[in-house]
Amino acid sequence: MGTSRHDVDLQVSDRRARPDENLNVLEERAAKNARKVARTVAAGLVTSLVVVGVVVLVYRRFRRPTLAERLQGMLPDALTGLPGQVRQVAAGTAMFRLLRRNRGPMYAKE
């Protein structure tokens, strides 16, 4: 039929006599589980970084530049770095009013 009560008692007493072996088995299981969790977390982190990078690249590729950015791109570098006094003198011109109205970062009011 099944295992007799005497056989079960012998197995239990045998296991109790060897607690170190049981602890070693438990420690090995815990270490395996810890490694598995660490691999899973690392894979999730790498995957999320890749997804964020792809999203940023796609956003930058398909985002339409603002009018101010397009106009600044057309200007030579010498004009985009004008000192404040020159900007104040030129503030009355139509182009600078347009840039200021579109919140061009380089031509914002000081």
Image: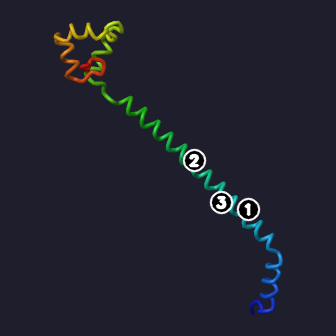
- Under mark 3, the amino acid is Asn
Q: Which colour scheme is used?
A: rainbow
Q: Mark 1 points at which residue?
A: 28
At a point 22% along the width and 10% down the height, the residue shown is 88
Q: How crowded is mark 2: few (under 14 residues within 10 Å), some or many (20 or more)?
A: few
Q: Where is residue 69 in the image (x, y as percent from the top left)?
A: 30, 20
Q: What residue type is labelled 2?
A: Ala
Whichever of labels 1 and 3 marks the residue nearer the N terminus, that label is 1
Q: Where 5 sits versus 53, above or below?
A: below
| Closer to the camera in the image, 55 or 31 | 31
Image position of 74 (left or right of 88):
right
Circle number at residue 33: 3
Q: Please give the label number shown on residue 80.
A: none
Q: In which quarter of the image is the N terminus?
A: bottom right
Which residue is label 2 attached to?
A: 43
Q: How far is the residue under mark 3 from the one under mark 2?
A: 15 Å
